[in-house]
């Protein structure tokens, strides 16, 4: 997927399982997101999101999902609708926000922080689990990832269940080449 320029990670581990998300930005205006969940019971999955990356500034930009692959099933579960809005994802967001469009791409927005911040889960149960040593996650974060509200995927679909878990994810800078 090109030369890696930066990598961000999110991980959550509890006694019931784990989830790891990696976001890798590449030099060729692409990005890849991997999502691996391994919880007790039926909640397991491994997905790869291939994205086009449009930076708006050094610390802000958009990721348009081109396809999602289910690694365990060995199949593609989403590919971008045949809608060509050009390469201007920010313009796409602004132009479509006031329109009623039936098929809209999956678009994430990200904001990079200038300095890492402490990462609190915001979930009292998880915070209590961490206090007693039953949960762990990254101590700091450097990037917020948001799912844009333009996404128009049926609520009960497999894809919607997968992407909804990405909204407001806090990722830490893992390495930089």
Image (cartoon, grey):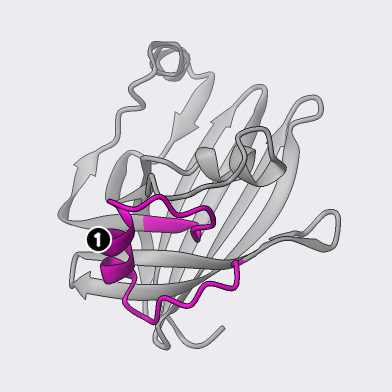
Q: For the N terminus, which image quadrant? A: bottom right
x, y percent for residue 44: 75, 38
Dominant secondary structure of the residues highlighted in magenta in the image: loop
Above or below — where is 97 with respect to 154? below
Q: Residue at x 69, y 39 (%)?
A: 157
x, y percent for residue 43: 74, 31
Q: Nearer the viewer, residue 88 or 33?
A: 88
Q: Residue at x 50, y 61 (%)?
A: 105
Extreme residue toward the front, this view: 100
Q: Nearer the viewer, residue 16 or 24?
A: 24
Could you tell me which secondary element the residue under label 1 belongs to?
helix
x, y percent for residue 103: 54, 57
Left or right of 82? Residue 151 is left
Is 82 a magenta residue? Answer: yes
Residue assigned mark 1: 94
Rendering quarter of residue 67? bottom right
Above or below — where is 56 with respect to 2? above
x, y percent for residue 78: 68, 60
Q: Residue at x 54, y 19 (%)?
A: 134
Circle 1 packing at 10 Å, graded few (<14), some (14-19), many (20+), is few
Q: Residue at x 73, y 45 (%)?
A: 45
Is 96 a magenta residue? Answer: yes
Q: For the C terminus, which image quadrant? A: bottom left
Residue stretch rendered in magenta on the structure? 80-108
Above or below — where is 120 with respect to 52? above
Above or below — where is 23 with respect to 2? above
């Amino acid at each position: 997927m090109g030369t890696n320029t930066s990598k961000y990670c999110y991980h959550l581990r509890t006694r019931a399982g784990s989830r790891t998300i990696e976001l890798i930005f590449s030099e060729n205006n692409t990005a890849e997101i991997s999502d691996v969940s391994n919880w007790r019971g039926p909640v397991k999955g491994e997905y790869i999101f291939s994205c086009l990356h449009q930076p708006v500034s050094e610390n802000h930009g958009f990721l348009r999902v081109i396809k999602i692959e289910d690694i365990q099933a060995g199949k593609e579960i989403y590919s971008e609708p045949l809608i060509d809005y050009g390469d201007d994802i920010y313009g796409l967001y602004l132009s479509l926000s006031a329109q009623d469009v039936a098929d809209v791409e999956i678009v994430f927005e990200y904001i990079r922080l200038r300095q890492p911040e402490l990462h609190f889960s915001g979930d009292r149960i998880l915070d209590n689990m961490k206090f007693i040593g039953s949960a762990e996650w990254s101590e700091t974060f450097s990037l917020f990832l948001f799912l844009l509200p333009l996404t128009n995927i049926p609520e009960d679909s497999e894809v919607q269940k997968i992407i909804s878990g990405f909204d407001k994810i806090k990722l830490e800078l893992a390495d930089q080449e």
